[in-house]
Image (cartoon, rainbow, N blue to C red):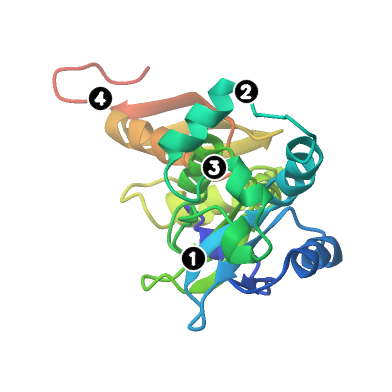
Amino acid sequence: MHKKVRDVMTREVASVNGSTPFRDIAEVLIAHEVSAVPVVDGEGHVIGVVSEADLLRKEEFREQYYQEGYRPPLRARLRNLTAGPGAGAEEKALGETAAELMTAPAVTVRPYTSVVNAARLMAERGVKRLPVVDDDGRLEGVVSRHDLVKVFARPDDDIVCEIRAEILDDALWADTSGVEVRVTDGVVTLSGMIPRHADARILTRMAERVNGVIDVIDMLTWQEDDPGGRSGR
């Protein structure tokens, strides 16, 4: 019910090594129509990522720094000093290879990471693509924002089928034959009769966690209330 990164990631991915020159990196980005590529070592471990932004810094600083008497603003100089060796924009602007241009360490995810957590990580770190690595850090694929968006744009019929097959028919130990499921534009409506109030609450919570569900409208009735409660609704 909860899709993982491995379910949506691209497995055939372009990558470069640390010695790949600037021009070749640019050609890889253009040829594969991507905004960033992982940088891997000889054993396939991801050691960084080179993005369009990293390459554009080089051109930007080439124009600025080579002007006579130019110095970057004080804020930029302080940021580069506090960021640590090799992390400043000026150093990247002077770089010629992937190892000198890349952002490291790379922000990565595991194949078994949920798509929700992957989306949160992208938002937190301000990136559009994440290398997917195994537990040893070796590249297995790449997941992009577009890959994740497809999960949340599922057809209504697919959502209905998943709720019926994986919740009503499999997960709940209750008679769900009287439950009706309707989905319109990702909004689920649950109606009909279910034996216990507790079952209705569980069903609603599980439906909310199905990928692609925007909201759940609970119109269920029940025969047996929780201890101390009243029957019906």
Q: Which residue is mark 2?
A: 73
Residue ID at (20%, 17%):
229
The answer to which of marks 2 and 4 sits earlier in the sequence is 2
Q: Is residue 208 visible?
A: no
**Disc 2 packing (10 Å; few <14; some 14–19; many ≥20):** few
Asked if disc 3 and disc 1 are in contact, CB closer than 8 Å, the reply is no
Q: Is residue 81 left or right of residue 74?
A: left
Distance in Å between CA atoms under marks 3 and 1? 17 Å
> Picture coordinates of residue 181 (x, y %)?
58, 39
Mark-to-mark CA distance, 2 and 1:
30 Å
Whole-percent x, y for residue 11 in the image: 63, 72
First in residue order: circle 3 vs circle 1: 1
Q: CA distance from mark 3 to mark 4?
A: 63 Å
Residue 63 visible in the picture:
yes
Label 4 sits on residue? 225
Residue annotated with mark 3:
88
Nearer the observer: mark 3 or 4; the answer is: 3
Label 1: which residue? 47
Report the front residue among 222 and 102: 102
Residue type, numbered disc 3: Gly
Towards the viewer: 231 or 109: 109
Residues at marks 2 and 3, CA–CA distance in whole angstroms: 13 Å
- The mark nearer the N terminus, 1 or 4, is 1
- How far is disc 2 from disc 4 in space, using C-alphas? 68 Å
Query: Mark 2 vs mark 3: which is more N-terminal?
Result: 2
Q: Nearer the viewer, mark 2 or mark 3?
A: 2
x 44%, y 56%: residue: 113
Q: Is residue 61 above or below residue 104?
A: above
Q: Residue at x 71, y 33 (%)?
A: 185
